[in-house]
Amino acid sequence: MAGFASNFKKQFKFKYIVSWVAVLAALIVLIILNNAGVLSRSVTGLLSRIAYSIILAVSLNLVVGFLGELSLGHAGFMCLGAYIGSFFANSISQSIDNKLIVLILAMLVGGVVACIFGFIIGLPALRLKGDYLAIVTLAFGEIVRNVFKNLDIFGGAMGYQSKPYNTKELYIVAFVAVIIVLIIIQNLIRSKHGRAITAIRDNEIAAKAMGINVTFYKLFVFMLSAFFAGVAGVIYGHFTTPVLYTTFSYNYSIEILVMVVLGGMGSINGSIIAATLITIVNFALQSKLSGDLAALRLLIYALILIIVVIFNNAPAFKNIRERFSIKSIIDSRKARNAKSQAKISDDDAKWDRIESKIKNDTILTPDLPHSDAPDESDSKEGK
């Protein structure tokens, strides 16, 4: 038992679970605030947007950051999930009264359909590399949304009339989905399959020479990423109505890619933070800039992104980034604690360094006779 505990302690690291533990803690706090009536309807709607944006960013990071392939068709997979998931939910809602079960089933169906199309597109497309793969995936996204635009069963150009989930509760389901996605992806990356995926990214020829099935892993990652994008699309379909094809444009695929790039290629925590911040910035700009000022929204949004990119990559800001990064703050805190502990250990006033006139093994209890005191029997004999 002791050996198992020591082995578990060596293998377990808190950094492996910090992302979904932080999301879980934030969700608990948000639920408490919502029950207390602190959160408004607009805030809970923003939380739902943040949740499906995190799913999109993390799943795309699996392809772009860990596999090393550039995909610009993520909005197309989200479009599939939104339309198919909403259509499925509307179809079964008459026979199933529980809306939560309907939403969960719709998420599974939308994810599976997106995964199937990920296989269909990925099998020929992943033979391409670089810009050619980006062009093919971009074309896929544009084709998908234009197909739904011209299908009357999905509402055509007017959009599909979905049945929105309760906004006060949708963010809870969405963040639970975020936690599940994070657990799956992080465990995948730390497994032998994840090491094979990163090996393909680092050197595909060397990975083939080591016996790694490159085609299988590329297709697997592409399909898994498409599945999660479809799940995010279902959440979006239950967040707003109607589901419009204009949402899933090329610009939205670029926005998801920006979340990945700003957060850091291959960084799950960075994707979470970047998706959250970009979604909040978009929401704030849409709320504040209305009417004639709405034309300035994209301009201000672009300037913010440019400033962030320059700050993250410019050599002139390297010292500032290193000084105020979370890692440096934690390291400096540990260094201060270690220094204070060293001062305490070198203190001459410590108890074990002070010379005492009384030995530690001396008995000070007055009830026992002292060894130097004269015995009563000896005093009587003297008399």
Image (cartoon, rainbow, N blue to C red):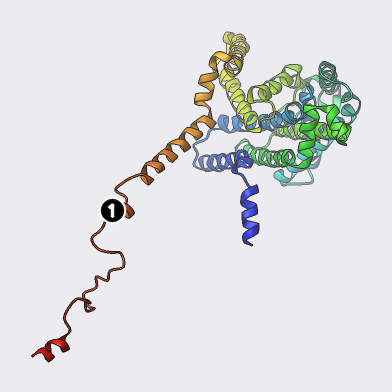
- In this view, which residue lies farthest toward the right? 124
**Direction from residue 84 to residue 98 in the image, left or right:** left
**Direction from residue 130 to residue 48 in the image, left or right:** left
Query: Residue at 58% across / 15% down in the picture?
Result: 315
Q: Nearer the viewer, residue 129 or 241?
A: 129
| Quarter of the image where the C terminus is located | bottom left
Query: Residue at 64% across / 52% down in the picture?
Result: 8
Query: Residue at 62% across / 35% down in the picture?
Result: 167
- In this view, which residue lies farthest toward the left? 383
Give residue 330's position: percent from left, percent from top.
50, 34
| Quarter of the image where the N terminus is located | bottom right
Q: Mark 1 = which residue?
A: 354
Does the rendering let one see residue 178?
Answer: yes
Q: Nearer the viewer, residue 172 or 200?
A: 200
Q: Quadrant of residue 268?
A: top right
Give residue 62's position: percent from left, percent from top.
74, 31
